[in-house]
Amino acid sequence: ALWRVNADGTGLVNMTASLPDFSANPRPVYSADGTRIVYLSGTSAANAAVYIANSDGSGAQKLPISFTTQVPLFYAWSPDATQIAFTMYSISLPDMDPDHYPGSAYVYTVATGVNAFLADSISYGMYWGQ
């Protein structure tokens, strides 16, 4: 589950209550302007899905990213929040450790729904330059 809370500890809200719960870290990442969030949800790595939503959790939509043998672990919004870069790692690896099992890099364009392959042998996260 992905939760939001006010700085004073009030207003606890489960932002993913209507989605399948993925007990692992959903790895949420806010867009640079703070209006959108991208995260992982599902009942297991084998059926997980990537979602984007408004920063309050409303308007959640499953991204049409197909992955049957890999799962995304790291995300980065473009500075203008129009694209999301992410790395995919094999779900069959014993510990999904990026140090030992490099992944593949992709970029997803939010407006068009186009998912483009960038490169193989990527370790750890994706970051945008300014």
Image (tube, rainbow, N blue to C red):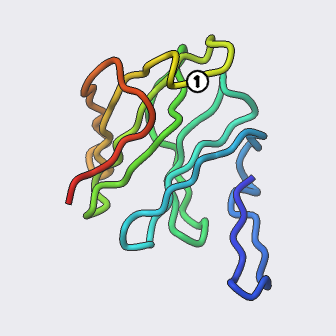
45 with respect to 69 (left or right): right
Give above or below for 102 relative to 64. above
The residue that appears at 37% across and 23% down in the rendered structure is 104
Residue 105 image offset from top left, x and y in percent? 34, 29
Badge 1 is on which residue? Answer: 97
Q: Secondary structure at mark 1?
A: loop
Q: Tell me which corner region of the image, top left, top right, bottom left or bottom right, holds residue 120.
A: top left
Residue drawn where x is 57% and y is 53% of the image: 28
Along the line of sight, the residue nearer the viewer: 22 or 65: 22
Is residue 125 toward the left or the right of residue 99 in the image?
A: left
Count of all numbered marks drawn on residues in the image = 1
Report the amino acid beneath label 1: Asp
Q: Nearer the viewer, residue 76 or 81?
A: 76
* Residue at (26% x, 30% y) in the render: 116
User: In x, y percent, where is residue 114?
Assistant: 28, 37
Judge whether 8 appears above or below 44 on screen.
Answer: below
Closer to us: 40 or 58: 40
| Residue 94 in picture, x, y percent from top left | 68, 13
Mark 1 burial class by Cα count in 10 Å: few <14, some 14-19, many 20+: some
The x, y position of residue 49, in whole percent, is 58, 36
